[in-house]
Image (cartoon, grey):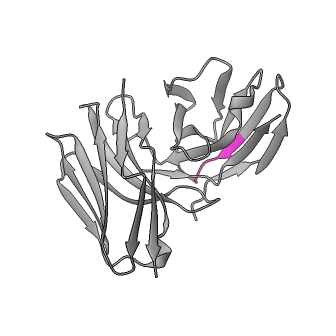
Amino acid sequence: ETGVTQSPTHLIKTRGQQVTLRCSSQSGHNTVSWYQQALGQGPQFIFQYYREEENGRGNFPPRFSGLQFPNYSSELNVNALELDDSALYLCASSLDLHYEQYFGPGTRLTVT
Amino acid sequence: GENVEQHPSTLSVQEGDSAVIKCTYSDSASNYFPWYKQELGKRPQLIIDIRSNVGEKKDQRIAVTLNKTAKHFSLHITETQPEDSAVYFCAARTSGTYKYIFGTGTRLKVLA
């Protein structure tokens, strides 16, 4: 298993609420990417953080936002939750931008 | 926009046979192509990757080939075993943005 961890494991929220998901990158890794994986689909790129700065963003609305901290851990925040936000949220870390990425176990978010 | 097509969506093979999964990418600026294996309820696991300056890479029973001209890359698994059963995802990373685009996945079943 990789050293990437995520919390919580599972989460149930109501439509309209806000949620914060957390990712602890593997030791020494300065790059974290976040993905949304709907059931039966491939991961969809949300955004990437490199040395505390957002380094790229996929086709997700502004209510998806994030942060990366000085220790390179990261948060994904989703405001005004919608039913379609129900998915597995994965983070992946890499040693640097050019290196391979390793995934965490994911957070399963259910919006009712 | 950027896109990665993956075929087939499902693949059943007899134990000991070979399996081939193919992907096509659209962004000619893509320069890194990883393959992930995802077992049910688990995180995607990097199994092999190839960079654009290499045409082929092999790791024991797994190999990946890349045709930059045709924008195709393929995963080859030889001597398949039941534990190879999983969903396999290809991905393409674009140079400059370091954004990953994933394929839609191939469900591989190895029949004993």
Residue name at image x 76 percent, y 34 percent: A20
Can residue B60 be seen in this snapshot?
A: no
Compared to residue B96, the image places residue A94 above or below, namely: below
Viewer-side residue, B26 vs A103: B26
Report x, y in % for residue B26.
28, 32
First to last magenta residue range: A22-28
Report x, y in % for residue A109.
74, 41
Residue found farthest to the top = A62
Residue A27 lies in the magenta-colored region = yes
Residue name at image x 60 percent, y 58 percent: A3
Viewer-side residue, A27 vs A62: A62
Q: Quadrant of the N terminus of chain A?
A: bottom right
Report x, y in % for residue B80.
37, 76
Position of B44 compared to A67: left or right?
Answer: left
Viewer-side residue, B13 vs B98: B13
Report x, y in % for residue A80.
77, 20
Question: Which image quarter: residue B77?
Answer: bottom left
